[in-house]
């Protein structure tokens, strides 16, 4: 092991983890007092993708992308109804270990007090992820 790796390892161990416990809300969520219904994080790949969609119980959402500012918007009644229908069928299951290689997208869903990360989408995840990605494309506008 080279000298820089030996010196860097203790520093990395002191850094706080970037993952957030399922029950912990972001500072913005605590400030507004809104209960989070579901959150999707989509990250990885060579391009360094980092998208996050947080939908609150009232249907209003926060859309965040690495390449721009976070934005807020409220889903339509139809979009929220479809999302809730898909969430009732959602089975989070167990986390999936990272695959070998470098160009993979990691999907993390936080719902009903649990947070699970996967690299492939199970059948019950696909409609939820599709709904959230569609909302992100519709409501997030670059500035």
Image (tube, helix red, strand yellow):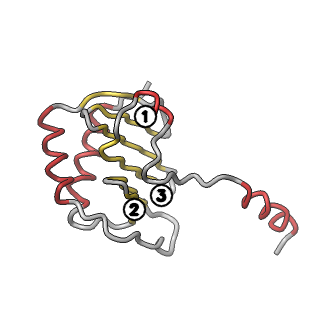
Q: Is residue 104 left or right of residue 81?
A: right
Residue placed at 72% from the left, 61% from the top? Answer: 13
> Residue 34: which quarter of the image?
top left
- Helix, strand or loop at label 1? It is helix
**Image quadrant where residue 70 sits:** top left
Please count the marks in the image: 3
Q: Is residue 80 left or right of residue 69?
A: left
Of tags 2 and 1, the one toward the viewer is: 1
**Circle 3 sits in a helix, a strand or a loop, which is it?**
loop
Q: Which residue is mark 3?
A: 45
Q: Nearer the viewer, mark 3 or mark 1?
A: 1
**In the figure, is residue 132 to the left or right of 65?**
left
Among the two numbered marks 2 and 3 on one chain, the one whose residue lies closer to the N terminus? 3
Where residue 50 appears, x then y in whole percent? 47, 47
Q: Earlier in the sequence, mark 2 or mark 1?
A: 1
User: x and y percent of residue 102 in the render?
Assistant: 52, 66
The correct choice, above or below, for 68 with respect to 50 in the image is above
How packed mark 1 is, by other alpha carbons closer than 10 Å (few <14, some 14-19, many 20 or more), is some
Residue 108's spot in the image, x, y percent?
40, 57
Residue that appears at 38% across and 65% down? 118
Instruction: Work out which quarter of the rendered image holds the N terminus and state it.
Output: bottom right
Residue drawn where x is 43% and y is 53% of the image = 22
Report which residue position mark 1 lands on.
29
If the image is split into quadrants, where does the C terminus sit? top left
Query: Label 2 vs label 3: CA separation?
Result: 19 Å
Cα distance between the residues tagged 2 and 1: 20 Å
Residue 51 or residue 92, whichever sits in front:
92
State which mark lies toward you, 2 or 3.
2
Q: Which residue is mark 2?
A: 116
Q: Are marks 3 and 1 in contact (CB under 8 Å)?
A: no
**Along the line of sight, which residue is nearer the eye, 118 or 23?**
23
Mark 3–mark 1 distance (CA, rounded to whole Å):
28 Å
């Amino acid at each position: 092991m080279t000298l820089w790796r030996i010196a860097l390892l203790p520093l990395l161990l002191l850094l706080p983890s970037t993952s957030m416990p399922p029950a912990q809300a972001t500072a913005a969520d605590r400030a507004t007092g809104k209960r989070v219904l579901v959150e999707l994080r989509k990250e990885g790949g060579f391009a360094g993708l980092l998208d996050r969609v947080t939908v609150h119980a009232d249907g209003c959402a926060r859309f965040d992308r690495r390449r721009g500012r976070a934005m807020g918007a409220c889903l339509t009644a139809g979009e929220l109804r479809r999302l809730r229908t898909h969430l009732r069928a959602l089975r989070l299951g167990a986390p999936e270990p990272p695959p070998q290689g470098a160009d993979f997208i990691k999907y993390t869903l936080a719902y009903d007090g649990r947070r699970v990360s996967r690299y492939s989408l199970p059948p019950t995840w696909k409609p939820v992820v599709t709904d959230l990605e569609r909302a992100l494309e519709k409501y997030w506008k670059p500035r």
